[in-house]
């Protein structure tokens, strides 16, 4: 039994923090859960974990849930082990994964979520739910010992996916080009998750949610579209 809600972005243009996914989060967590454990490591500690936690705490309180951050307790592993739900927010994916390794939280989170504890990720928090973080958009501002992540989800996600703009004068590689380059060296399929889209996992059922759809990239196959409500299978 596994429950995941993997959201492309925490803020959608024209709305506030987590506004676009508010209903989905409430439906996902339900009424029995009272407290959510937060992991703020996607922001460098110099860019206050306290400030990030304050923002997340205020938002989850409006949703009806208490929030406590792993950086606020002496024993973060114990907090994970006793958690009702886990939320990892966005930021820099390399900094986030480094923080998870440095604090010894990879295995405790993996074990807890694989046993049925709900997991919510936004942006970088969705990236680290994948087998690796190799499809993140972020600059590698922190050197890592490994790209291997939580491996809670069987496919790679590219959050904030942007379609090629035929009218753009930008001469750099498109997101689609970068993902196709990844597939030259790796076999795991990639979900280009547009802003406003999210993936919900309930046991073995994977469903695309949200308003904007996603693009699927498989090795040696032309990319194709999926829409909200579609089941994601056999990638």
Image (cartoon, helix red, strand yellow):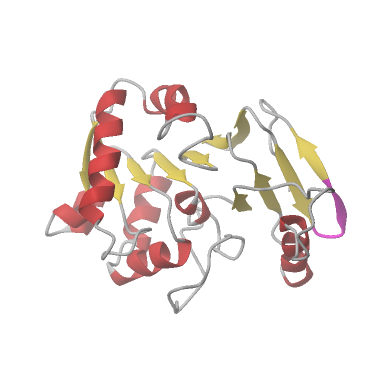
Q: Left of 96 or right of it: where is 156?
A: right
Is 76 in the magenta?
Answer: no
| Residue at 57% across, 60% down | 136
Q: Which residues are magenta?
A: 219-223
Q: Main secondary structure of the magenta part?
A: strand
Name the foreground residue: 164 vs 147. Answer: 164
Residue 127: % across, % down: 52, 54
| Residue 83 in view (yes/no) | no
Residue 139: % across, % down: 53, 68
Q: Left of 218 or right of it: where is 127?
A: left
The number of numbered discs placed on residues in the rendered structure image is 0
Residue 130 versus residue 197 in the image, above or below: below
| Residue at 38% across, 58% down | 42
In the rendered image, which quarter is residue 78 located in? bottom left
| Residue at 72% across, 63% down | 178
Q: Left of 117 or right of it: where is 177?
A: right
Q: Left of 76 or right of it: where is 95?
A: right
In the rendered image, which quarter is residue 119 located in? top left
Residue 234 versus residue 108 in the image, above or below: above
Residue 31 versus residue 16 in the image, above or below: above
Identify the residue at the far front of this view: 169
Identify the residue at the far left of this view: 74
Name the foreground residue: 47 vs 185. Answer: 47
């Amino acid at each position: 039994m596994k429950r995941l809600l993997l959201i492309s972005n925490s803020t959608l243009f024209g709305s506030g923090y987590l506004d676009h996914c508010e209903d989905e989060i409430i439906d996902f967590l339900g009424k029995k859960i009272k407290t959510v454990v937060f992991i703020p490591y996607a922001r460098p500690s110099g860019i206050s974990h306290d400030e990030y936690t304050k923002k997340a705490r205020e938002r989850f309180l409006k949703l009806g849930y208490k929030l406590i951050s792993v950086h606020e307790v002496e024993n973060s592993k114990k907090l994970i082990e006793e958690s009702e739900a886990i939320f990892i927010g966005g930021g820099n994916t390399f900094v986030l994964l480094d923080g998870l390794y440095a604090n010894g939280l990879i295995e405790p989170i993996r074990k807890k979520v694989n046993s049925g504890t709900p997991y919510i990720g936004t942006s970088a928090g969705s990236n680290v739910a994948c087998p690796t973080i190799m499809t993140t958009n972020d600059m590698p501002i922190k050197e890592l010992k490994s790209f291997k992540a939580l491996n809670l989800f069987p496919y790679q996600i590219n959050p904030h996916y942007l379609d090629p703009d035929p009218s753009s004068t930008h001469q750099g590689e498109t997101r689609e080009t970068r993902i196709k380059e990844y597939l030259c060296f790796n076999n795991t399929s990639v979900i280009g998750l547009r802003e406003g889209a999210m993936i919900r996992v309930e046991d073995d059922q994977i469903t695309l949610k949200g308003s904007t759809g996603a693009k699927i990239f498989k090795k040696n196959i032309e990319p194709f579209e999926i829409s909200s409500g579609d089941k994601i299978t056999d990638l």
